[in-house]
Amino acid sequence: MDVGQRIETEMEKQRVDADQHADHGGKHEHDSNARCLEQRSSVCHERHRTRGIVRAGRILGRMDLTTDRSSRPLVFLRVLAICLATVAIVGWGIALVSAPDWFGRSFAIDYGIYMDAVDRWLATGDWYQARQLAGPYPIELGDVLYPPVLLYLLVPFRFLGPWLWWLIPAAILAWVVWHHRPAPWALVVIALCLAWPYSPAKYVFGNPVIWAAAAVALGTIWHWPAALAIVKPTILPFALVGVRDRRWWLAVLGLAIASLPVLGLTLLYPQVLLDAQTNPIDGRGGPLYSITEFPLIAIGLIAYLGRRRLSG
């Protein structure tokens, strides 16, 4: 074989080797691409499967609270709160049906007492009854036990009527509870406060304390409204809810300024309270006579203390 033939043979062998290498490289690249696509498809499938499991878990968690043992006490507390509230509502419904005469005599009776005081003040300038200014006296139905600054609230309702008088503070209290979204344990306590007979009775009677309860409740959100409850000294601890807020003190200052036009009557208020004696017949009055109102006034505070972001 001459030199020319050897060169041609060597070149042919190199071309064959090059073609084989190219075919092998293309196949390797194709296999690599196929494996990448397969891995990506597997990852995507796993992600979709995981998302489906999470979504299903959320939906099932909402639909079936009893599947998680840790949620059973919460369900029990919610049911208990609903039962207590139902008992209170049904109980008062039965009382309304079985004793309509009592309800007719009792509805807005305290509202009427303070409307009479408004009329007396508008006619003669007197806020308290004469017997309340003649020395120690047993507390009786019809006595005025609030300072005259309450006139700013009472006078408009002389024309608005008794229904709005109790509906507005009731709506405020309900809104505050809804705003805080209290935990189940707090709902149970609130239901107990509502089941306490004196609490709904204050709304039936139209007692001004229902406005104090609304003020304290609003104080758990904006602080300063709680200062308005100091017009009833026997519930002073509840009025201190927002005492650390400067606006609370500004509200107290506002009450003081508002009392200036009726300053003479305001100065009589401490003596009227000191002269008030417990009625020996029905036990009305005394330094602790407002203790029966504490559950009602505490509802807003309970909702605040039991708000979900603290209870987890």
Image (spheres, grey):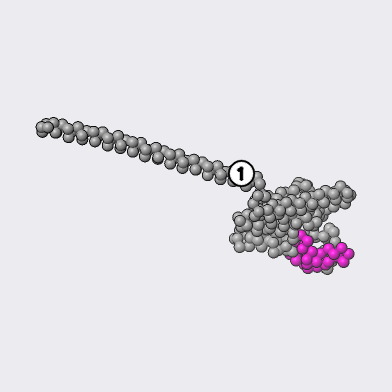
Left or right: 115 in relation to 220:
right
Q: What residue is drawn where x is 45% and y is 39%?
A: 41
10 Å neighbourhood of mark 1: few (<14), some, or many (≥20)?
Answer: few
User: So how many labels did they put on this image?
Assistant: 1
Residue 104 location (% of width, % of height)? 86, 49
Q: Which residue is mark 1?
A: 59
Depth check, front residue: 203 or 49: 49
Where residue 27 sits, quadrant-wise, is: top left
Residue at 63% x, 57% y: name it.
Answer: 311
Q: Where residue 192 sits in the image (x, y, percent)?
A: 75, 56
Q: Nearer the viewer, residue 16 or 76?
A: 16
- Please tell me which residue is depicted at 76% across the width and 53% down the height of the picture: 84
Residue 213 in percent (x, y) is at 72, 56
Question: Which residue is the extreme one toward the front?
Answer: 1
Residue 273 left/right relative to 20: right
Q: Kindly indicate the quadrant of the structure image that contains residue 238.
A: bottom right
Q: Which secondary structure lies at badge 1?
A: helix
Can residue 1 be seen at all in this image of the molecule?
yes
The quadrant of the picture occupied by the N terminus is top left
The quarter of the image holding the C terminus is bottom right
* Amino acid type, residue under disc 1 in the picture: Ile
Viewer-side residue, 68 vs 178: 68
**Residue 285 is a magenta residue:** yes
Span shown in magenta: 264-293
The image quarter containing residue 260 is: bottom right
Q: In the picture shown, does residue 237 fall above or below 91?
A: below
Residue 183 position in % (x across, y down): 66, 54
**Residue at (87, 63) in percent of width and height:** 282
Q: Is residue 222 visible?
A: no
Q: Is residue 162 magenta?
A: no
Going by the picture, which residue comes out furthest to the left?
Answer: 2
